Image (cartoon, rainbow, N blue to C red):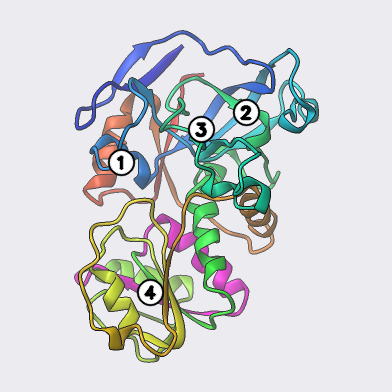
Amino acid sequence: MRAMVLEKARQPLVLRDVPKPKPKAGQLLVRVSACAVCRTDLHIVDGELPNPKLPLILGHQIVGRVEKIGEGPTPESADRTSEFKIGDRIGIPWVGWTDGDCVYCRSNRENLCDRARFTGYTIDGGYGEFVVIDARFCFRLPEQYNDVDLAPLLCAGMLGYRSYRKTGDARRLGIYGFGNAARLIAQVALYQGREVFAFTRPSDKAGQEAAKKLGAKWAGGSDDMPPEKLDGAIIFAPVGQLVPVALRSLAKGGIVVCGGIHMSDIPSFPYADLWEERTICSVANLTRRDGEEFLEIAPRVPVRTETEIFPLEEANTALNRFRSGQLNGTAVLMPPR
């Protein structure tokens, strides 16, 4: 099969002919229909995340169809292959495997499993024609969406939704970094009656207008203070300096949620900014429950995605345009038919 392969960090991906993967017991072989490009892919390519599998096929926002079902003896608790048949359309997310037996997995915190494996990072992902996935870690997909529009929901949507859930019942919600995840989750927040305050790069007037058009009550630069104190804030931009800024925007008891897998260092700040029961928390990965809940609510909103399609072999172009902020939506790679 053809795949775009990362052979070394900080170098472009290379188009290669690689062996078609074979599913083992408990696994599915999936023909990739679409794979969205994520900021995490950039962090891996740019060497900001440690110890990726190399060589590596990136990609963890995958929509595809079941091509083959692995055979062989597998403990019932570790096998969901009987739930699928050839041709089923499924979604494949970031978390690709957990042991199911550690203290985290047994307490509904599988996202923290010490032995977890991740699609497009420690196991091969969707920047290719085929991918193998543990059948426990894939999703049935809403029929209302086509393949391209679904792909961004599988990370930007799901991880964004976990970040959103962490803000509890915050009525006034600030979102720092109004990119793909922010646009998706803002739609859910507005649907549920929250007030959204959008923060972009200070000079990004077009982004601020887009946020207002989406329904934000207010939009401004990340160096601005909102007109009202916030009950919660999500930081999607990987910029540690925004943490103290967001803290200062909070009302008493508010929470700042850091929604990225990678962030630059957080500078020191006075204790007074944290006092009065303000909190900071990070979001690590996602659980299958997060994904299922988000895919259930997304069609009801309905959450709408903006995408820009690239042929698989133009993955480097998509990554470079993402890095430089030149995309007009989420980049989605399409393998050859």
In the picture of the structure, the residue carrying the numbered disc 3 is 34
Between disc 2 and disc 3, the foreground one is: 2
Residue 161 picture quarter: bottom right
Q: Position of residue 234 (x, y in %)?
A: 42, 69
Which amino acid lies under the numbered mark 3 shown in the image of this protein? Ala
**First in residue order: circle 3 vs circle 4:** 3
The reply to whether callout 2 and callout 3 are in contact (CB within 8 Å) is no
In the picture of the structure, the residue carrying the numbered disc 2 is 134
Which amino acid lies under the numbered mark 2 shown in the image of this protein? Asp
**First in residue order: circle 4 vs circle 2:** 2
Q: Residue visible at 65% across and 39% down? A: 101
Q: CA distance from mark 3 to mark 4?
A: 29 Å
- SS of the residue under disc 2: strand
Q: CA distance from mark 2 to mark 1?
A: 23 Å
Q: Is residue 293 above or below residue 203?
A: above
Q: Is residue 296 above or below residue 224?
A: above
Is residue 186 on the magenta stretch?
yes
**First in residue order: circle 2 vs circle 1:** 1
**First in residue order: circle 4 vs circle 1:** 1
- What range is drawn magenta here? 178-203
In the picture of the structure, the residue carrying the numbered disc 4 is 198
The reply to whether callout 1 and callout 3 are in contact (CB within 8 Å) is no
Q: CA distance from mark 1 to mark 3?
A: 24 Å
Between disc 4 and disc 1, the foreground one is: 1
> Left or right: where does residue 180 sit relative to residue 243?
right
Which amino acid lies under the numbered mark 4 shown in the image of this protein? Ala
